[in-house]
Image (cartoon, rainbow, N blue to C red):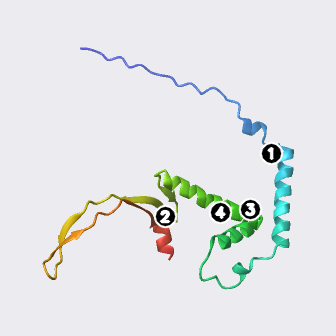
Amino acid sequence: MVTRQVKTVRKTAPAVRSNPIRKTAGKSKVAPAVLKLVTTKAANKEKTAASVPKPASMTGPLPPIVTLKHLAEWAGYNHGIPKKQATEMFTGLVADIGRVLKKGSKIRIPNLGVLQVRIRPARPARKGRNPATGEEIRIKASKASKKVAFRVAKGLSETI
């Protein structure tokens, strides 16, 4: 009869590692210069939010057509940056979107949708028939065309 030998493996405790969190538990995690910068930014934001009145387009009824300038004005107010800087940012964003689409990429913005260029190939000239009279007609050739298409995201279509 064959007996089977079973090896017993003893597990040892893992080596103790130094934990930097324990060492700095009582200390501030942020350097004083960074902490000062953060607090001054917060204070400046409070000052600008208090001193700058709400844009007129935000207080009254919404305009029938919301433009890029309106969006920039609202973003500037909400994030505490000047209206001019916000307008430049939005204009740059639109230019970047155009550049990316021109190269053939899709742009996916979560909860908004997908922008892409759809290409329709050129079609040669052909013959067709008038369905009412049965007369044969000549259909001209068409050029290739590009069109920017926007597909709405599910989240946006559900909120509307």
Q: Position of residue 57 (x, y in %)?
A: 70, 79
Q: Which mark is residue 30?
A: 1
Between the C-alphas of marks 4 and 3, the distance is: 9 Å
Between the C-alphas of marks 1 and 4, the distance is: 33 Å
Mark 2, mark 4: which one is toward the viewer? 4
Q: Secondary structure at mark 4?
A: helix
Quarter of the figure with residue 85: bottom right
Q: Position of residue 34 (x, y in %)?
A: 82, 47
Could you classify mark 1 by the number of other residues whose Cα lies within 10 Å: few (under 14), some (14-19), or many (20 or more)? Answer: few
Lower sequence index among marks 3 and 1: 1
User: What residue sits right under mark 4 in the picture?
Assistant: 90
Q: Give the residue type at disc 3.
A: Gln
Lower sequence index among marks 1 and 2: 1
Q: Give the residue type at disc 1.
A: Val
User: What residue sits right under mark 2 in the picture?
Assistant: 113
Q: Secondary structure at mark 2?
A: strand
Q: Give the residue type at disc 2.
A: Gly
User: What residue sits right under mark 3 in the picture?
Assistant: 85
**Is label 1 in contact with label 2 (beta carbons under 8 Å)?**
no
